[in-house]
Each structure stands twice: as structure tokens, then as C-alpha cells.
Image (cartoon, grey):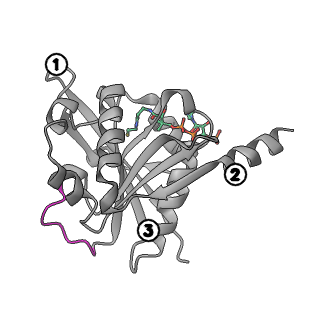
């Protein structure tokens, strides 16, 4: 019974990569994620809501990958994730051929959580990263107090890196408090 449900869920979930012409979709979902989960991200809604069309489009033209998850008969968007060469705030000037990729900007709609949406998005990003020559590792940053995300990443095979792989980061929507960010990694077998 539970296997059938799981299979049905997977069938009903599409993971789709956004194209430059989808910049308005990226804007809508990304801003929704920043509004919904301000404490999960270094970036803040009040800054990103001022970005113009060219900025959003540029995010889809830099060689990185943004995926969204669509679910149900009405194809509602229920999640978003990004695979980049470096965290999204630092992209400019980074070498796109470096041998690691960062998973970031991860968000699942509150009503769609704990139904495998993140798992499916990570599977898709892993496939894409593995297909890139020389990429053998995924990295991500997670705030120390984001226990839900930490536990989810552990379940998905990410491992904590050492204490020196931590970073004291500003959290813009948390009253200027700083928060420890911890880095996690996952090795990728070759295809
Ligand atoms: C973290 C987040 C992306 C998880 O998404 P999700 O779609 O609910 O995760 P999934 O259903 O794919 O679960 C993946 C694994 O994590 C586990 N997991 C998910 N939520 C969990 C929770 N609250 N507590 C413990 N484990 C959890 C699941 O059990 C699953 O493991 P399993 O398949 O072995 O059982 C979602 O809670 C979210 O969007 N949070 C707010 C934004 C955020 O924190 N983003 C991350 C920034 S680093």
C-alpha cells in the first residue's frame, strides 16, 4: 500500500529545469520562498524583490541550473532548488568548470513537505552534476538552527564537514544577528 502511494507520488511530481524565458516563474517562486522561510536563507526578500527582469534572466543564463517541482493535476509549483558553481550571491566571476557544485536556494511549499519533493529535486540535480565533466562532489550550506533541513540533507546522503568548514554569516531578516552556517558534502559516483 505505502509502495503504491510512493510510486503514485513520484509519478505525479515533475522536476523541470527553468529556461531564460521562465525568468518570471523564477522570480515568483524565489520571492515566495524568501517570504515564507526568511530564516533559512542568507538572501532577503526585501533586497531580491527589487531585482529587475535583467537580473532574474541573468540567473538563468549563467550556465547554472534552477529546477522547480510541479505536482498534482493542476501542476502547481511546490518546490525550487539551484545547482551552481558557487553560492548564488558570489556567482559573478567564478570558474564554472570547478569540480564541485553547490546545492542552494532550496525550498518546498509548506503544504507539500515530507512528501519527497526535496528528494526528487536533489536526485535531478545529482544527475545533472554527475553529467558535467570532472564534477564529483556536491556541497551546500545550512544554518546551524535549521534542524529540519539538516536532518533532511542527512537522510539524502549529505555528510557534515569539519568544524573549520563553518562560516559565521549575517542573516539579514533576523534582526542583523549572525548565524553559524555549516557545510555538508556528498560524493558523486561517476556515470
Ligand atoms: C528542508 C525542506 C526543503 C525539506 O523538503 P521536503 O520536500 O519536505 O523533504 P523530503 O520530503 O524530500 O524529505 C527528504 C528526507 O528528509 C526527511 N525529512 C524531511 N523533513 C523532515 C523533518 N521535518 N524532520 C526530519 N526529517 C525530515 C524525510 O523523512 C526524507 O527522508 P526519508 O525519505 O528517508 O524518510 C523543507 O522543509 C523546506 O522547504 N524548509 C524551508 C526552507 C529551507 O529550510 N530550505 C533549506 C535551506 S538550506
The residue beneath circle 1 is: 175
Query: Which residue of the protein is positioned furthest toward the top in this rendering?
Result: 175
Note whether residue 60 is visible.
Answer: yes
Does the residue tagged 3 have its C-beta within 8 Å of any atom of ligand 1? no
| Left or right, 57 with reference to 16 | left
Residue 6, percent from left and from top:
74, 44
Residue located 57% across and 48% down the image: 119
Secondary structure under badge 3?
A: helix
- Of tags 1 and 2, the one toward the viewer is 2
The residue beneath circle 3 is: 129
What is the spatial separation of the Cα atoms under label 3 and label 1, in whole angstroms? 36 Å
Residue 106 falls within the magenta-colored stretch: no
- Of tags 3 and 2, the one toward the viewer is 2
Prevailing secondary structure class for the magenta stretch in the rendered image: loop
N-terminal-most mark, 3 or 2 = 2
Residue located 22% across and 32% down the image: 45
The residue beneath circle 2 is: 11
Residue 8, percent from left and from top:
75, 46
N-terminal-most mark, 1 or 2 = 2
How many neighbours does mark 2 have within 10 angstroms: few (below 14), some (14-19), or many (20 or more)?
few
Q: Nearer the viewer, residue 31 or 85?
A: 31
Q: Based on the displayed image, in which of its 4 quarters is residue 144 positioned?
A: top left
Q: What's the magenta region?
A: 90-97
N-terminal-most mark, 3 or 1 = 3
**Circles 3 and 1: CB distance less than 8 Å?**
no
Query: Which residue of the protein is positioned furthest toward the bottom in this rendering?
Result: 133
Secondary structure under badge 1?
A: loop
Residue located 29% across and 27% down the image: 38
What is the spatial separation of the Cα atoms under label 1 and label 2, in whole angstroms? 42 Å
| Left or right, 137 with reference to 69 | left
Residue 167, percent from left and from top:
22, 42
Amino acid at each position: 500500500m505505502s509502495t503504491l502511494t510512493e510510486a503514485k507520488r513520484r509519478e505525479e511530481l515533475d522536476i523541470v529545469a527553468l529556461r531564460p524565458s521562465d525568468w518570471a516563474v523564477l522570480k515568483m517562486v524565489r520571492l515566495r520562498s524568501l517570504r515564507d522561510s526568511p530564516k533559512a536563507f542568507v538572501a532577503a526578500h526585501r533586497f531580491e524583490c527589487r531585482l529587475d527582469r535583467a537580473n532574474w534572466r541573468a540567473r538563468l543564463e549563467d550556465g547554472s541550473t534552477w529546477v522547480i517541482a510541479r505536482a498534482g493535476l493542476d501542476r502547481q509549483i511546490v518546490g525550487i532548488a539551484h545547482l551552481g558553481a558557487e553560492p548564488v550571491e558570489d556567482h559573478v566571476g567564478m570558474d564554472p568548470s570547478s569540480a564541485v557544485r553547490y546545492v542552494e536556494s532550496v525550498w518546498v511549499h509548506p503544504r507539500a513537505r515530507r512528501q519527497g519533493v526535496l528528494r526528487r529535486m536533489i536526485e535531478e540535480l545529482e544527475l545533472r552534476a554527475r553529467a558535467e565533466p570532472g564534477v564529483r562532489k556536491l556541497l551546500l550550506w545550512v544554518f546551524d538552527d535549521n534542524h529540519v533541513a539538516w536532518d533532511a540533507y542527512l537522510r539524502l546522503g549529505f555528510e557534515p564537514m569539519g568544524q573549520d568548514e563553518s562560516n559565521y554569516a549575517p542573516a539579514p531578516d533576523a534582526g542583523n544577528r549572525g548565524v553559524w552556517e555549516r557545510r555538508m558534502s556528498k560524493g558523486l559516483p561517476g556515470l
